[in-house]
Image (cartoon, rainbow, N blue to C red):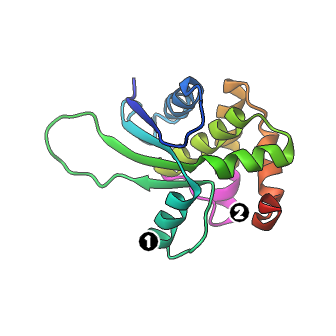
Amino acid sequence: MSGVCVRNESGHDLDTALLIEAVRATLRMHEDKKSPDGRVSIVLTSDERVRNLNRRYRGIDRVTDILSFPAVPHGIGEEEPDLGDLVLATPWASRQADRVGHQLMDDLALLVVHGTLHLLGFTHDDDRGSDAMRAAQDAVLQGLGVPPENAEHLEQLSETEVWA
């Protein structure tokens, strides 16, 4: 079973069991993409830290809800492979959830599923990729008991609305 490490530096008191299960469920459903035994790190952090990472690695100077950083294969030994890191702006996600009337943990789970799919190579750069990613995301969310329509609600928010 995959190793999932959660580091909560957000100041929010969160039960992270759902986030760990979100990673594991995503990996189990997509064993054809990568080993379900890969390691994933989740960092729950501040808006400012995510904004800094977004600026540094993507050239976009604004906060976002989640960033996915696929691991670079190192080829050393027979260790459990690192799949990558997920960095979530918890205050940002909390504001989004409040704005659309969702439970914060449901939205964090959705973001973790979305990010894990990116680590597995899914993209939403075109209609075909977007459709495949949406179907994969919805299947995992249903298994977790998280309403798949939450994703549509979050997509409908503009960043300025979240701050309002």
Q: Amino acid at mark 1?
A: Arg
For the residue carrying disc 2, how many other residues have a C-alpha within 10 Å: few (<14), some (14-19), or many (20+)?
A: few
In depth, the one of 46 and 63 nearer the eye is 46
The answer to whether 103 appears left or right of 47 in the picture is: right
x and y, in percent, of residue 102 in the image = 80, 38
Q: Amino acid at mark 2?
A: Asp
- Identify residue for label 2: 127
The answer to whether 12 appears left or right of 70 in the picture is: right
* Residue drawn at x 55%, y 52% as measured from the top left: 46
x and y, in percent, of residue 93 in the image = 68, 48
Q: Which quadrant, please, contains the C terminus? A: bottom right
In depth, the one of 90 and 83 nearer the eye is 90
- Numbered disc 2: secondary structure: helix
- Identify residue for label 1: 56
The answer to whether 84 appears left or right of 58 in the picture is: left
Real-space Cα distance between discs 1 and 2?
28 Å
Q: Which mark is residue 137?
A: none
x and y, in percent, of residue 117 in the image = 54, 46
Location of residue 57 with respect to 16 vertically, above or below = below
- Quadrant housing residue 149: top right
- Quadrant housing residue 26: top right
One can see residue 132 in this view: no
The answer to whether 159 appears left or right of 85 in the picture is: right
x and y, in percent, of residue 9 in the image = 48, 42
**Is 126 included in the stretch rendered in magenta?**
yes
